[in-house]
Amino acid sequence: MMAKDVHGMNVAAQELADLNTAHQDLADDIATYKANPGIDSANAAATAPEPAKPRHARKPTK
């Protein structure tokens, strides 16, 4: 980036500031999600439905 490109530097700085703000907002949402006592990722995997059984039995190989 050239030193004369002040507008480009300002745009890049604003994009970084926007990304930083979005990341902080997301971090707050993740903390709220994890703090919810009704959601437990360890139990979510244990209560997952069983995979569907095949409709037709496979023919034995010879």
Image (cartoon, grey):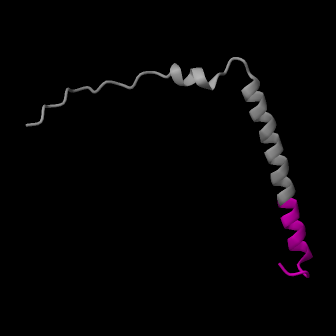
Front-lying residue, 45 or 25: 45
Q: Which residue is located at x 73 percent, y 28 percent?
A: 33
Q: Is residue 8 magenta?
A: yes
Quarter of the picture holding the N terminus = bottom right
Q: Which residues are magenta?
A: 1-15
Question: Percent position (x, y) of residue 23?
Answer: 79, 46
Q: Is residue 54 toward the left or the right of residue 25 in the image? A: left
Above or below, 8 relative to 30? below
Above or below, 5 relative to 14? below
Quarter of the figure with residue 55:
top left
Q: Which residue is located at x 13 percent, y 31 percent?
A: 60
Question: Percent position (x, y) of residue 31?
Answer: 78, 32
Question: Percent position (x, y) of residue 30?
Answer: 74, 34
Q: Is residue 10 magenta?
A: yes
The secondary structure that most of the magenta stretch takes on is: helix
Question: Percent position (x, y) of residue 29?
Answer: 77, 34
Residue that extends furthest to the front in the rendered view of this protein: 42
Front-lying residue, 28 or 10: 28
Q: Is residue 38 toward the left or the right of residue 3 in the image? A: left
Above or below, 21 relative to 42? below
Quarter of the figure with residue 41:
top right
Count of marks placed on residues = 0
Q: Which residue is located at x 88 percent, y 78 percent?
A: 5
Front-lying residue, 40 or 7: 40
